[in-house]
Amino acid sequence: MAISPILLVLHSLLLFFVSVALSATFTLTNNCEYTVWPGLLSGAGTAPLETTGFALEKGASQTLNVPSKWSGRIWGRALCSTDSTTGKFTCVTGDCGSGTVQCSGSGATPPATLAEFTLDGSGGMDFYDVSLVDGYNLPMLVTPQDASAGGNCSPTGCLVDLNGVCPSDLKVLASADGGSESVACKSACDAFGSPQYCCSGAYGSPNTCKPSSYSQFFKNACPRAYSYAFDDSTSTFTCNNANYLITFCPDTASQKSAGENPAAAAGLPVINNTMVFQSGDQASGSRTRAALLPMLLAVLAASCLSSRHW
């Protein structure tokens, strides 16, 4: 059976459109008053993204294409510098230990606020959360955009600066102006290492590992974020075919009334000033490409019939 050149071209186009339509767009925005260096780590068996770390200046945004089935973590590194003698790049909080701006397969050193994703998981749904299980270093908001119907598809994150109000035995201090200031807040597990705080050993189940006063501190401040290992019921969210905005230091001053916006209704900020694109622009590109798939399939089928040789 001979295969026509037209059929080969259509087949290639179909594969391209399918792969792009199933990808998601992550837009990372820095609303902090200082530079943030996002770190990105792919989960086991998941291909790395196009970058594993970069600088994000105050007010800047960067957009990444994330393939279907990707899982991994995204966090912010702060107070970073490059040693003038050794050339080694390090960060006071969120450092990944690679010695360079790229994390290259290394994860965040606790404490760090983590955005965690599993795309196209069970039932085809995206699963995502913002976790303080490894402690906290920066406010972070994850906002789904342009999702199809289904799931508990809501913004989540930790919107407040906890470093100043962190319990004294969890504070991470760094030198500043001749003194010291709190730059991150450890988890109780990281601070004390005991099984009851780490949910390990005899405390390795939801029945035996209950919220501590330390995890309750995180939960009270950030009700939608993971506060300890078994805080699943109020801290895991699902979306169908969404794109995601990930904002460091979200602008809580620009909230609209609850009747105007679902994020405000959920007690979360509206951050339109940080969006790289709105639902009708680039963010809807994967939806537009997906709409072309039926037409491409029809053309491909017709071409198959016309080029069949018996």
Image (tube, rainbow, N blue to C red):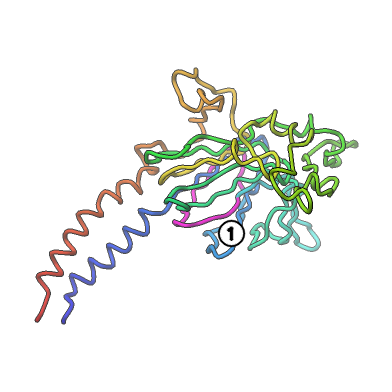
Front residue (pair 290, 90): 290
Magenta run includes residue 122: no
Q: Which quadrant of the rendered structure holds the N terminus? A: bottom left
Q: Is residue 71 left or right of residue 24?
A: right
Which residue reaches farthest front?
Answer: 207
Front residue (pair 105, 213): 213
Which secondary structure lies at badge 1?
loop
Q: Is residue 210 above or below residue 290?
A: above
Q: Residue 83, percent across and down?
A: 78, 57
Q: Residue 308, percent across and down?
A: 12, 75
Q: Residue 300, percent across and down?
A: 19, 64
Q: Residues within 10 Å of mark 1 (few under 14, many from 20)?
A: some
Q: Which quadrant of the rendered structure holds the C terminus? A: bottom left
| Residue that numbered label 1 is attached to | 43
Which residue reaches farthest right?
Answer: 178
Q: Is residue 190 left or right of residue 27?
A: right
Q: How many marks?
A: 1
Residue drawn where x is 78% and y is 36% of the image: 212
Q: Is residue 121 above or below residue 270?
A: below
Amino acid type of the residue tagged 1 in the rendering:
Gly
Q: Residue 74, percent across and down?
A: 60, 49
Residue drawn where x is 55% and y is 39% of the image: 142
Residue drawn where x is 16% and y is 75% of the image: 4
Which segment is the magenta one?
A: 56-73
Q: Is residue 148 left or right of residue 82?
A: left
Residue drawn where x is 42% and y is 44% of the image: 240
